[in-house]
Amino acid sequence: MKLALSMAGDTLDAAFDARFGRAPFFVLVDSESGEWTRLPNPALEADGGAGVRAAQFLAAQGAEVVVSGAYGPKAWTTLHAAGLRALLAPEGQNALIGRQLLDQFRAGTLREAEAASHDGHHGG
Amino acid sequence: MRVVVASGKGGTGKTTLATALAQVAAETQAVRVLDCDVEAPNAALFLHPQWSSGAEVTRPVPRVDAERCTACGRCAEVCQFNALAVVAGAVLVFDELCHGCGRCTWICPEQAIHEEPLTVGQIEAGRTLEGIDLAQGLLRIGQPMGLPVLRALKHWPPTTASASVSASPLPWIEIRDAPPGASCPVVETLRGADAVVLVTEPTAFGLHDLRQVVGIVQELGLPAWVVINRDGIGEAPIDAYCAEQGLPIALRLPLERRLAEALARGQSLPEAAPEYRPAIRHLLERLRYEVGGS
């Protein structure tokens, strides 16, 4: 499974970023082999629709599952239409790093986002 | 002459002053008021017009013919606002992100995209007993962008044949009541104006936002006058700032309980306090003298 994590830094051992559309990086990791690549988020500077852009980008990169902290309605709709699973990192755990989320995914403890987590942001 | 009443900070007295200028001007001039605060127009609360006409405001949004679309992704690539996404062989369109620029329609190699009008708000227009023409824009609830409504309002009425103030034999004045803030809707309200009246209050917030709007006004090269409302309520150095910027202070209105009560009842400033009429007339004459025009 190809897993995309929203990240504050650009390695698997960097800090997780709970924002989906505005995370500076994604780390795309193969859940079986543990091999990963860094992907700068092209939506970081978007005036609006950052979640839409990020979701489309990850679909094009071949991601099958996304792990983030929250999804807006348009991001969630785009991920859903693209056939990607949207998973939520556990709340209230500060300073999570990417590798811990990979472990939690492998252990099957990450919760599925059944719908958008919030009403969305307006503009930049 | 087109005059904008702006402030930056909300609740400083823009509408109080704009409607006061309109009522005093109407004694000798043909007046039209544009309530440009399309998210919460309220000049009508003071002017009490008889609404008589209006129109829906639309903006174009793309619609994709799924039969023709090959999901090539060009439309999403060229969209500056991420209003389109191409995933799993289909195009998703997010109307609320679309600015109606038409790029996607133009670029589509299959000509699979056409535009349809989406209603985003309305214009309402009418006249007051003293003969003031008032038009207001009203953004539809849930719509995120007021600019299309504001632009349509500035072009109201749609035909020159109707009874517009510019056809009047009297000298005419257009007064635009600006929205609060210092972003796109305020810039659009200021665009095409001849003069600006900046209403502020002597508080830290009042001064902070005054600076922001003055920055825009200077960028646009418009002459401006300052009105200090609730004069005496705070310590913010408005006078010093205006002196430094070369902005004339045209009027000071102290905080008075009887005025606050009258305004809360829907009375305008000249109705509640006729003693301010000469000072308001003086401000209008100053604008006309120094800016010129009809």
Image (tube, coloured by chain):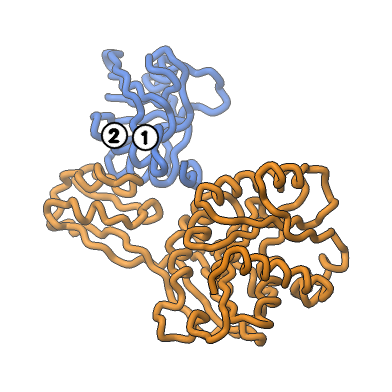
Task: Please name the residue shown 60% across and 45% down the image.
Answer: B212
> What amino acid is found at the position of numbered circle 1 in the picture?
Ala
Spatial distance from mark 1 to mark 2, Cα to Cα? Answer: 9 Å
Circle 1 packing at 10 Å, graded few (<14), some (14-19), many (20+), is many
Task: Please name the residue shown 82% across and 54% down the image.
Answer: B231
Q: From the image, tell me which residue sits under label 1.
A: A43
**Residue B107 pos. (x, y %):** 18, 51
Colour chain A appears in: blue
In the image, residue B143 sits, relative to residue A45, either above or below, namely below
Residue in front for this viewpoint, B236 or B52: B236
Task: Please name the residue shown 67% across and 62% down the image.
Answer: B14
Q: Quadrant of residue B270?
A: bottom right
Q: Cβ–Cβ below 8 Å for labels 1 and 2?
A: yes
Q: Of the residues tagged 1 and 2, which is closer to the observer? A: 1
Asked whether residue B289 appears in the rendered view, the answer is yes
**Residue B55 pos. (x, y %):** 44, 77
Which SS class for mark 2? helix
> What amino acid is found at the position of numbered circle 2 in the picture?
Phe
Precedes in sequence: disc 1 or disc 2? 1
Q: Which chain is indicated by disc 2?
A: A
Colour chain B appears in: orange
Picture quarter with the C terminus of chain B = bottom right
Asked whether residue A111 appears in the rendered view, the answer is no
**Residue B198 pos. (x, y %):** 65, 56
Q: Quadrant of residue A43?
A: top left
Q: From the image, tell me which residue sits under label 2.
A: A57
